[in-house]
Image: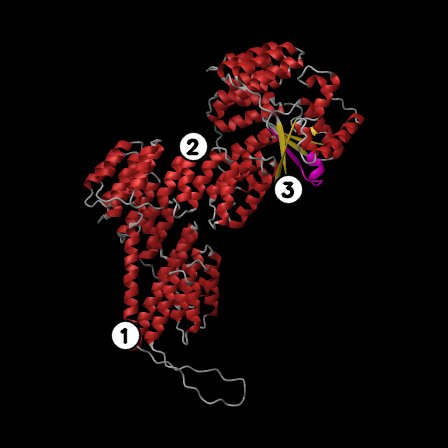
Amino acid sequence: MERWMTIYNHRKILIFHFLIANGMILRKLSASLTTGYGASCHSMHLRLLHTSCIRPLKKQRLRRNFHNPKPSNPKRSPPTIAPIVSDSTIVQWNTTITNYMRSGQCDSALSMFEKMSHRTSVSWNAMISGYLLNNRFDLARQMFDKMPERDLVSWNVMITGCVRNGNLGMARKLFDQMPERDAVSWNAMLSGYAQNGYVEEARMVFDRMPNKNSISWNGILAAYVQNGRMDDARKLFESNSAWDVISWNCLMGGYVRKKKLVDARWLFDRIPIRDEVSWNTMISGYAQNGQLSEAQKLFDESPVRDVYTWTAMVSGYVQNGMLDEARRVFDEMPVKNSVSWNAIIAGYMQCKNIDVAKELFDAMPCKNVSSWNTMITGFAQSSLIDLARDLFDKMPRRDCISWGAIIAGYAHLGHNEEALRLFVEMNRDGEKANRSIFSCILSTCAEITSLELGNQLHAQLFKVGLGSGWYVGNALLAMYCKCGNIDQAYVIFEEIADKDIVSWNTIIAGYARHGFGKEALRIFESMTRSGVKPDEVTMVGVLSACSHSGLVDIGTEYFYTMDRDYGITANSKHYTCMIDLLGRAGRLDDAQNLMKNMPFEPDAATWGALLGASRIYGNTELGEKAAEMVFQMEPNNAGMYILLSNMYAASGRWADVGTMRLKMRDSGVKKVPGYSWLHVQNKIHTFSVGDSTHPETARIYAYLEELDFRLKKEGYISSPKLVLHDVEEEEKEHMLKYHSEKLAVAFGILNIQAGRPIRVFKNLRVCTDCHNVIKHISKIVGRLIIVRDSHRFHHFRDGVCSCGDYW
């Protein structure tokens, strides 16, 4: 009997290790329904279980004889007396190992384990579960493989560890190798499949289980609910009558998340015995979906209101913009926790009432990392980046959200270098970036056109397994489009398994801006065939593709049929695209007529499109009219002043050019200086017209002279009339030769390995002479040269540009 009790209690402590290491599905289920309440009960249960395991074992002793292996020497050795180890000593050793593991001291636990003169399966299992608890999966697997004899708990602990580590293949392999299985074994596999979205596999495990318990039934129910399969969950629920309150709450919570409040209420009214989670789930469901009168009614009827009940009401009022009501409930709360404080602080931050939010934060007695994050995010979103940074620097502890908030704050305000510096610092600090941070940094790379850094981030994403999915995929897609690598962008687009509307819109707009209009339309047709309905942004991309590629008839057809085919009413952006399309094609009268028939007044962008078309075709009179309208709407738009001035210069109207300059000076409008840049070996090289500050100026200028000689030999003659200054012809030709984009292209040819594209970026529109010269250079040197100006990309190859000279 004594030996039986020893084995029984050993088994209990093994179960304790198993629960500590893996956290069964009921704990996950309870945590998904309410935060904190279930966790405290679970923790108390584990403490009681641990106590019940240890006490009886301390009172028992067990003698064991140890047999030494036969020596290799044929000479017989004198017999040795096996040491006597009491059961209480073994329990003490095992308990010490467990305590070391709980406190994260894995090396001390291993040292204790290796010093043990005798080890039981409990000892081995304590090491395995401890390693798993500390996320040392490889060491846990090594310990499991070394076990001289495994028991059922050993297998269950290791299988659950595989599940937690995301290695379902290994978990299934171990499961199939088990000499015997119990309900824990089956439930571990069921939980693993369910948590990773393999619902059908979870159901197969459930159906094969020889003996199902409440954990099994709740596990498959949670699998359906967590994966949004509410019809299957309801069918399963109705097939069994022995559900506990956790099951009712699980199904009701699923309906709440799906915003099916009628079904949730139907269940709520039929729960045999409601607990706090039942009331809180239904109240928060009403509150989060704007049905605050129903939420308040249930709140008043609730027999027991805990802190989560009150917090649900506060959060509901905050989410629906009813801050006064939220504050009233908050002030009436008998007990407040950090979630309550964070909810009301977030409400004030959302309403930009920064002072009150700061007062509450300063008065908050129970600040946690979420409290600091709420304040940092609020400051950053209100453009108070200095205050956000001050709090960030003072934080006692930071998490991934903290870093993401401050990085996003700097990126949003255009402080891209600081955002990147913080990202590097975060990595050095040992914090792992999540999808949100990667997406933000990829957007920053796109803003500064750093393709090399974007490539490095892409590799890092692939390494950590975050490269799949639409969220990061769309950020990668946009980065490659904006940084000039449209081919890689298409590869990313194809790899996104769950494409959303943003994925389609990004690749269509990308091809349009790169001048590949036909490819953009091909993808658009593929989008409609796949059943994805276009939106307003889609049609802007389609019309832009037609405009940049001169596809007038196709663009016109899309414009006049998008309402009928897709239910999209044309807005100002669609009209601007159409006027640009007609204007670039030389149909200026049609463009003007379309403007007259617009259902709303043209904005500055629409008049700007007409002005641009007027410049292309030298219609100064129409250009003057369009420019005057732009000046009325946007008096500080320097680009429109320059565009009209260029028209005057091209027509030889130098007096009008001088008048425009005086007008700009009197209005306080300053011309933005043009400059070009490119990335070479992780360094940015910037050039302005006639630049002589670059370390390789002499080499660049000498190479440009060589190119100029070869261009003239090929028959190319520059166009001095494109120089917008009243100077001699020879000086005009000299001025054209050293435009910033030509300097950048020359530097790229000299320093970028042959076979690699040369990517140059310019802050203004590329001039006509530079466009023509770079076409010829691409043929002479046999290089792909990609230039992005303020409007679009130009891909120069073999003397041809992707825009077809239609720009």
Q: Which of 347/67 is in front?
A: 347
Q: Name the residue under label 1.
A: 59
SS of the residue under disc 1 = loop
Place of residue 42 in the rendered image (x, y in percent of width and height, measured from the top left): 30, 56
Q: Name the residue under label 3.
A: 681
Q: Which amino acid does label 2 sit on?
A: Ser
Q: Which amino acid does label 3 sit on?
A: Gln
Quarter of the rendering containing residue 675: top right
Q: How crowded is mark 1: few (under 14 residues within 10 Å), some or many (20 or more)?
A: few
Q: Which of 376/614 is in front?
A: 376
Does residue 368 appear to the left or right of 306 in the view shown?
right
Place of residue 473 in the rendered image (x, y in percent of width and height, measured from the top left): 52, 41
Residue 263 seen in this snapshot: no
Q: Which of 185/629 is in front?
A: 629
Q: Which amino acid does label 1 sit on?
A: Lys
Q: Mark 2 points at which residue?
A: 383
Q: Residues within 10 Å of mark 2 (few under 14, many from 20)?
A: some
Quadrant of the rendering where the C terminus is positioned: top right
Tell me, yes or no, whether the highlighted magenta stretch contains residue 758: yes
Work out whether mark 3 precedes mark 1 in sequence or the reverse, and give the earlier one: 1
Image depth: mark 3 or mark 1 in front:
3
Place of residue 229 in the rendered image (x, y in percent of width and height, measured from the top left): 38, 45
Q: Give the extent of the magenta segment.
A: 747-762
Work out whether mark 3 precedes mark 2 in sequence or the reverse, and give the earlier one: 2
Q: Which residue lies furthest to the right in this view?
A: 713
